[in-house]
Structures are given as C-alpha cells and as structure tokens.
Image (spheres, rainbow, N blue to C red):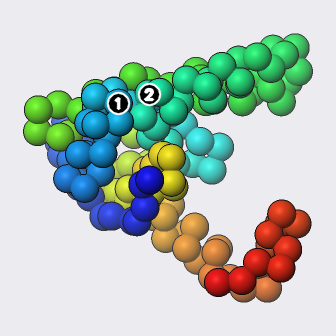
C-alpha cells in the first residue's frame, strides 16, 4: 500500500530517488521492476510491473476501432516504459515522459494505494487548488453516505 506525498528532486540525468519506505516495498513486491506511463491528467503513473500487467491487458482488449479506446491505448500503453530501480534506489524517467508531464527538477511522488502518481510541482499545485476549490466537491454515487 503506497500512501503519502513526497517532494523529490530529479537529477541532471532524469533519475529519481525513490524514498526508502517505498523502495523496500517495491523491491519485495516486484524486485524493483516497474512500469512508468502517461496519464490523461498530465502526470505519470508508476506501477509495480505485476500490478500493471492486468491493467495493460484490459486496455489492449478494447477495440482499436473505437476512437476513445484507441486514444487511451496510445496514451497509456504507447507511453508505457519498463523501468528498474538501480542499486541506489533510483529510477530513470525518460526525456519523453519528463516532457509529457512537464517534469523539471522538483517533482511530487504521490501514493495512490496500488501505484504512484508523479507530478510536476506546478501540476501538483494546480491539482490541490482544484481539489480545494470547494463548490463542485460532489462525491461519486458509490460514496453516498460516506463520512470521514
């Protein structure tokens, strides 16, 4: 279970040091084999490889003749890259994915339970502003009656 938001720095080569609390879990869960891909919201998704594979299979089972499905396939599977934690617990974010998400030196790694989101600092701040904007904060019907 991956939780929390952590501010991290990309080095000059585009490598990201994964925090030790997550690194240990990733090494035990998938041997450090991960998949990094683009998300329609402008961030990157980072999955342990075994968790990504059923998602990819489901996406690729969609009809390529449906324009919405093929757009999703191109984005999620077309940008998917196998990455591996190196001996120092870092992973390399390709220039293509860094450009897609607008990643510069400072980034946010945000746990989402089964995976992570990787945001540019600017993108993350915009997401927080939108989340806190208030009036349109309606819960999905699945959470009707939910309380914190």
| Above or below 87: residue 106 | below
| Above or below 33: residue 127 | below
x 88%, y 21%: residue = 66
Q: Quadrant of the C terminus?
A: bottom right
Q: CA distance from mark 1 to mark 2?
A: 7 Å
Front of the two marks 1 and 2: 1
Q: Quadrant of residue 40?
A: top right
x 61%, y 25%: residue = 54
Q: Quadrant of residue 74?
A: top right
| Residue 148 vs residue 137, the one in the foreground | 148
The residue pinned by badge 1 equals: 30
**How many numbered callouts?**
2
Q: Is residue 128 left or right of residue 30?
A: right
The residue pinned by badge 2 equals: 49
Is label 1 in contact with label 2 (beta carbons under 8 Å)? Answer: yes
Q: Position of residue 48 (x, y in %)?
A: 42, 34
x 28%, y 37%: residue = 28
> Which of disc 2 and disc 1 is earlier in sequence?
1
């Amino acid at each position: 279970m991956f939780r929390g938001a952590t501010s991290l720095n990309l080095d000059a080569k585009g490598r990201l040091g994964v925090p030790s609390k997550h690194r240990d879990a990733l090494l035990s869960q998938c041997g450090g084999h991960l998949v990094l891909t683009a998300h329609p919201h402008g961030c990157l998704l980072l999955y342990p490889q075994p968790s990504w594979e059923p998602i990819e299979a489901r996406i690729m089972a969609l009809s390529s003749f449906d324009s919405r499905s093929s757009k999703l396939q191109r984005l999620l599977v077309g940008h998917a890259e196998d990455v591996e934690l190196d001996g120092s617990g870092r992973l390399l974010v390709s220039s293509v994915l860094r450009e897609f998400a607008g990643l510069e030196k400072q980034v946010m790694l945000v746990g989402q339970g089964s995976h992570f989101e990787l945001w540019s600092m600017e993108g993350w701040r915009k997401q927080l502003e939108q989340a806190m904007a208030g009036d349109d904060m309606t819960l999905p019907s699945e959470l009707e009656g939910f309380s914190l």
